[in-house]
Image (cartoon, rainbow, N blue to C red):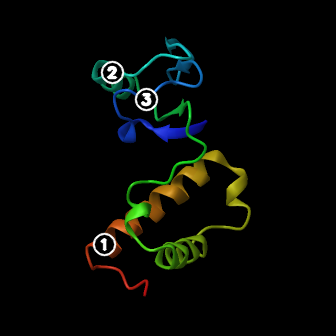
Amino acid sequence: MAKIKVNELEAGMQLASDVHDPNGRFLLGEGCELAEKHLKALQAWGVLTVDIAGVDSVESKLTQQVSPEILEKLRSDVRARFREGFEKQPFMQELFTEVVNYECEAFRQGSSDAS
């Protein structure tokens, strides 16, 4: 199972675990097959990620659109901007991922010098 961002979910995916809103309120149960209405509800309730069955790991769609060499260079450049040990803090891990995604998009659009 892999955590997938709500904005990257697709109808037909199946939940690997229960989903709760940020306040702990139960929203959807394990095994639920997601429909469009579920995707909209998850966004409305402020859910950021969910566990999806049958997926071991997931890369952002943006990171899949650059070569592995460029992706590693971008990650290295971004890692240099963070304090040592940031990986131990979930929020900082998420921030790191978002910055890498931003840099991937900038590279794809030609406004980054990762090469």
Quarter the C terminus occupies: bottom left
Q: Which residue is mark 2?
A: 35
Q: Earlier in the sequence, mark 3 or mark 1?
A: 3
Q: Earlier in the sequence, mark 2 or mark 1?
A: 2
Q: CA distance from mark 3 to mark 1?
A: 28 Å
x, y percent for residue 49: 50, 35
Q: What amino acid is found at the position of numbered circle 1 in the picture? A: Arg
Q: Residue at x 37, y 65 (%)?
A: 65
Q: Crowding near pointer 2: few (<14 within 10 Å), some, many (20+)?
A: some
Can you tell which mark lies on residue 108?
1
Determine whether, in the image, residue 106 is placed left or right of residue 52: left
Q: What amino acid is found at the position of numbered circle 2 in the picture? A: Ala
Judge whether 77 appears above or below 48 on screen: below
Q: What amino acid is found at the position of numbered circle 3 in the picture? A: Met
Q: Crowding near pointer 3: few (<14 within 10 Å), some, many (20+)?
A: some
Q: Residue at x 64, y 46 (%)?
A: 90
